[in-house]
Structure formats: C-alpha cells, structure tokens
Amino acid sequence: GNSVTQMEGPVTLSEEAFLTINCTYTATGYPSLFWYVQYPGEGLQLLLKATKADDKGSNKGFEATYRKETTSFHLEKGSVQVSDSAVYFCALSGFRSNDYKLSFGAGTTVTVRA
Amino acid sequence: DAGVIQSPRHEVTEMGQEVTLRCKPISGHDYLFWYRQTMMRGLELLIYFNNNVPIDDSGMPEDRFSAKMPNASFSTLKIQPSEPRDSAVYFCASRGTPPNTDTQYFGPGTRLTVL
C-alpha cells in the first residue's frame, strides 16, 4: 500500500536559517504529493503540492520537487521566520478514484527562534 | 467559500455516551473524508465517501463508529458508546474530482475528550 516516511523531529532553528525536511514515499503508479502545515490549535492547511514527476511545488518561500527516481519530495525554505513554527506533514494521494485518501507521514515539528 | 465546516469544535463527554460529529463539505466537492489525529497514531483515515456513497471504511476502528452522508452537503461521524481511547481530534476534509481539484481541504477539526 501507499506510505510516507518523513524526517523525525523536533527541529529547532534560528531565524533566517535554512530548513530541510526529508520525505520519501512508497506508492504504486503516479501519486500526487503534498505538504500540509498545521499551526498550533488549528487544522491542516495545504502548503504546496506536485502532481507529476519533476514538478516543483512552491508557496510562501517553501519549495519541494517531485523526484520519482528517488521517490522523494523534500521540503526546503531558504530563510525561515518565527511564524514558520508549526508541524509539517508530507502526504500522498493515489491517482485512482478508489485511492484518493491521503497517506500522511508522522509530521515534523519545527520551532524557529528569534 | 466558507471552507469545510465542522461542529462542534470541542466536545467533552463521559465514557459510554453517544457522540455525533458533523461536517459540511465545500460546495461542489463530491469526495468527503474523515480523519483522526492522535499523538500515538498520527493522522489516519477513518472513512471516505464519493457522491454520498462510502468508498473505503477500512479505517473505522470498530462497530462503535459509524458514518453517514445523507446528502452532498452534510456528513456525520457517530461514536456509540464512546470510550476514553476515542479522545482525539477528528478532521473532515473534502475535494473535487480531477481535473477540478486534487487537493483535500480540511476543516478546523473537532477536539473530542472522553472522560
């Protein structure tokens, strides 16, 4: 079945540092890949997505590239801010209508210090 | 659009009581998902619907859990009887059918505490 493995946290960074969260996946066919972010006490918000190999998703300074050859979708940001403190989830969705559920990684807690 | 709406936002109940969680998906979305989030198990799918029909309920923990979608704009997740181990945040999400969208949009969640 589909599965996602992401880097364990927690991760603590200083403001303006570079952030990378590793994510690898196992899936059949051509899944869509997502990064969701969860701020304290809130629901999940879509951060970015990619639907086919070599696509790059980007939003709010975050980027991730769909790498089929390494089955990876690593999240990066060049200069983090305190407001980026949150839990980040990597997820995938199958491409068939009976496999649209999201399979999530365990989540990575990121804390950015001023 | 108002986004996915869930109610209540918080629910505290005693073991053995019936609990009903409610969800209104985004208008026009024909897929609806129920997820549960706990510290121990992370985010896990409970059930999802397409055009009001359950497609995959393999994540429903046991017979105490049931979900319905009587129409395109409303779904319920019921736990009867509730147990302390059901304490979690329950999320509802919805999406359309490609090519309209392949993104699931989440509601704010219902935080359930069973004493």
Image (cartoon, rainbow, N blue to C red):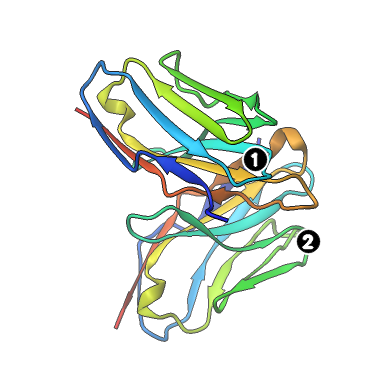
Q: Of marks 2 and 1, which one's residue comes earlier in the chain?
A: 1
Quarter occupied by residue B72 = top right
Quarter occupied by residue A84 = bottom left
Q: Is residue A11 left or right of residue B16?
A: right
Q: Is residue B97 above or below residue B53?
A: below
Q: Which residue is mark 1?
A: A2
Q: Which residue is mark 2?
A: A53
Q: Is residue A79 left or right of residue B84?
A: right
Instruction: Classify the position of the C terminus of chain B by image quarter.
Output: top left
Identify the residue shown where x is 42% and y is 86%: A16
Q: Is residue A96 above or below residue A92?
A: above
Look at label 1 and name its amino acid: Asn
Image position, residue B18 (x, y; %): 32, 19
Q: Is residue B4 above or below residue A86?
A: above
Q: Residues within 10 Å of mark 1 (few under 14, many from 20)?
A: some
Q: Is residue B99 left or right of residue B75?
A: right
Image position, residue A105 (x, y; %): 51, 49
Query: Disc 2 is attached to a residue of which chain?
Result: A
Q: Secondary structure at mark 2?
A: loop
Identify the residue shown where x is 47% and y is 45%: B5
Q: Residues within 10 Å of mark 2 (few under 14, many from 20)?
A: some
